[in-house]
Image (cartoon, helix red, strand yellow):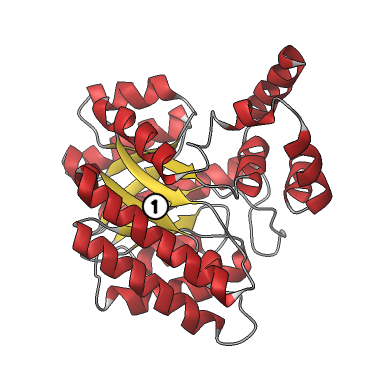
Amino acid sequence: MLRSTILAAARSGRCRSLVEQLPPTRAIVDRFVAGDRLEDALAVGRDLVASGRSLTLDHLGEDTRDAAQAAATAEAYEKLLAALRETGLAEHAEVSVKLSAVGQFLPRDGERTALENARRICAAAADAGTTVTLDMEDHTTTDSTLSIARELRADFPWVGVVLQSYLRRTEADCRDFAGPGSRVRLCKGAYQEPASVAFQRREEVDRSYVRCLKVLMAGEGRPMVASHDPRLIAVAGQLAQWNGRSKDSFEFQMLHGIRPEEQLRLVAEGHTMRVYLPYGQEWYGYFMRRIAERPANLAFFLRALSSRN
């Protein structure tokens, strides 16, 4: 019930205005978001890379209904990728893109616009010597996102996709995307979904995650294990061993600001540990989903509000 309430607030303009007006909010958001500007993201990214971690950068934005804004988001990614190339960070960083931010939901030719803008971003990534992963949103976007991913992979076979274990379909999607050269980020999922398409209980989501991991680890692509759960991290390591995988054939991924000690532990063990690093002014929806995902995040937010007030 609490998670549903928070996710509903993430879609509320009125709640957004209230949260943004709270004086201490910006300092708390900084735990999860690198900052509003590209320069902020590069500064935080340099520190993370210096510690041995890799990056996937997300220029925040989603669900745009304006073609000009979609094009502006693609241009922002082109600038980001040029900056990664110029600073030398491209060797350690890729980018994550929400297709809804580049036109997927435009009332006319949304998918075509999103594909064209995503192709621009992929071309810039190729020029920078790095890769792109397409983020996944709620279940209504899954077919469209995977279709666009297949189109892009014809020219950019390294394009990655995100699959969410709380969706009942995901084990089958993992089989479809576990072929040679594929890159699949497996996460649990952060949107409110109906029981008809998604598992509702945590244990069901976790069991689905393990089934999906088994498919990916036995496949021919690169599994990207996006989880902060110690049990699932341990399971991923064991499955990698059982499938004869070297440490450089898969990677772990975690969100900026969550379990940094565990991130460094995995680095020390010789694993690739990629940090999901968002930046930009459209931080509200992302921030609220992080709060909804884990009770510890909500407790942190409330404690910080109380102490700063």
Residue depicted at 35% across the width and 50% down the height: 214
Place of residue 49 in the rendered image (x, y in percent of width and height, measured from the top left): 27, 32
Q: Position of residue 128 (x, y in %)?
A: 21, 57
**Quadrant housing residue 159:** bottom left
**How many residues crowd mark 1 within 10 Å: few (<14), some (14–19), many (20+)?**
many
The residue located at (60%, 48%) in the rendering is: 190
Which residue is more in the foreground, 303 or 265? 303
Outermost right residue? 14
Dot 1: element:
strand
Residue 142: in sight, yes or no?
no
Q: Is residue 153 above or below residue 174?
A: below
Residue 12 visible at all:
yes
In this picture, residue 224 sits left or right of residue 165? left
Identify which residue is drawn at 48% across, 63% down. Answer: 73
Which quadrant holds the C terminus? Answer: top right
Q: Please tell me which residue lies in front, 69 or 253.
A: 69
Q: Where is the N terminus found, in terms of image quarters? A: top right
Q: Position of residue 46 (x, y in %)?
A: 30, 33
State the count of labels.
1
Taking the view exactly as shown, the residue that stands out farthest to the top is: 307
Residue 39 at x, y percent in the picture: 40, 41
Does 13 appear above or below 63?
above
User: Which residue position holds label 1?
Assistant: 185
Horizontal relation, residue 75 to residue 241: left or right: right
Looking at the rendered structure, the kind of residue marked 1 is Arg
| Image position of 306 with respect to 198: above or below | above
Residue 6 figure quarter: top right
